[in-house]
Amino acid sequence: ILLSYSTSRKEAMGTRHIQNVLFLFLLGASSLTLAQNLYCHKGISMSIEEDPSSTFNWTTEKVETCDNGALCQESVLIIKSGARTAVLATKGCISEGTQSVTFAQHSPPPGIITVSYSNYCEDSLCNNQKNLVELWRPDVTPASNVSTTLHCPTCVALGTCLRAPALPCPKGTDRCYQGKLRIIGGDINSALEVKGCTSVTGCRLMSGILTIGPMWVNEMCPYQTLIQPRKIENGAPWLPISVGRFEFLLQLLLLPLLVLFS
Ligand SMILES: *[C@@H]1O[C@H](CO)[C@@H](O)[C@H](O)[C@H]1NC(C)=O
Ligand SMILES: *[C@@H]1O[C@H](CO)[C@@H](O)[C@H](O)[C@H]1NC(C)=O
């Protein structure tokens, strides 16, 4: 309206000016249609659940308006040890990425189970997953099917475990895991402590996949030397420990780099 007003007032100034104004007007109209606002569900959740597939409610109260070129995302990290499961979830706009769905099983059952899911999508309010029913169906191992020899301190907690009872391990696991995860990104900045039975070697609950949508996970196992020694393999019982230390050092070295790049 403003532009057509100025055209009629300044008609006398010649055709060139009118052409410029018309060009500006067209430019304005086309960028209006391109820059339709994208809205995304927004919210974070960090909780410890007994049965996330039936109790976890992933609806959020808020909606946010994204900057140009952004997408919507919904991402969740789920870690189960013993009877309890940590769920860290985030929804919102994300400035970079392509439309995609990513599902990863970082550590498989039996023992500690770690999975993650991330959905990037381009339509308003498309990050609308309401629960974890489709995403989280751990095979329930019969409680009786446990090893009689191996017991591990078992817990999962936001922050620090207050207690970690030594529980018998499921068959198919052969060592104890104790680690701390720092999860940063997607409005989350949280620590998780995880202890339990596993067959995963070293400090690799995340299996080296350290990004889950906008979240970045730093896995550290400060108690690694306290873990009961594994059966001696090839006469080199020190190997798992030194590998773990190396990974720990590597992550310490990588952390400042990632901070620099983010
Ligand atoms: C989930 O929470 C929202 C509000 O936070 C509520 O309106 C909705 O009914 C809840 N859904 C279920 C299945 O409990
Ligand atoms: C118990 O574990 C063993 C070895 O992993 C497996 O072969 C067996 O099927 C399990 N038993 C039950 C009842 O699940």
Image: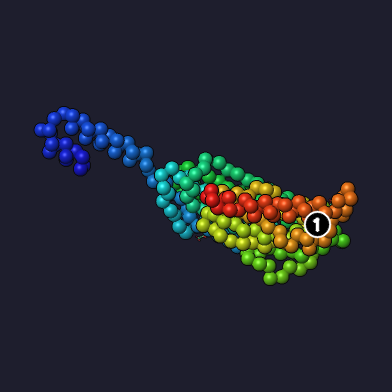
Q: Position of residue 194 (x, y in %)?
A: 69, 61
Q: Position of residue 37 (x, y in %)?
A: 39, 46
Number of on-image labels: 1
User: Tag 1's secondary structure?
Assistant: strand
Q: Is 121 displayed left or right of 78 in the figure? A: left
Going 62% across and 51% down the picture, which residue do you hit? 254
User: For this rendering, which residue is in front, 53 or 75?
Assistant: 75
Going 63% across and 64% down the picture, which residue do you hit? 158
Amino acid carrying mark 1 in the image: Arg
Q: Can the viewer see residue 75 in this picture?
A: no
Looking at this view, name the residue that lies furthest to the top. Answer: 15
Give the colouring mode of the picture.
rainbow
Q: Position of residue 140 (x, y in %)?
A: 74, 55
User: For this rendering, which residue is in front, 62 or 31?
Assistant: 31
Q: Is 221 displayed left or right of 217 in the figure? A: right
> For residue 166, what is the image quadrant?
bottom right
Q: Position of residue 108 (x, y in %)?
A: 73, 50
Position of the N terminus, as image quadrant, is top left
User: For this rendering, which residue is in front, 231 or 166?
Assistant: 231
Which residue is labeled 1 in the image?
A: 175
Going 78% across and 61% down the picture, which residue do you hit? 225
Looking at this view, name the residue that lies furthest to the left. Answer: 12
User: For this rendering, which residue is in front, 125 or 5?
Assistant: 5
Q: Is 129 displayed left or right of 65 in the figure? A: right
Reply above or below: 16 against 250: above
Going 68% across and 57% down the picture, which residue do you hit? 220
Instruction: Answer few, some or many: residues within 10 Å of disc 1's Cα (few below 14, many 20 plus, some between 14 and 19).
Output: many
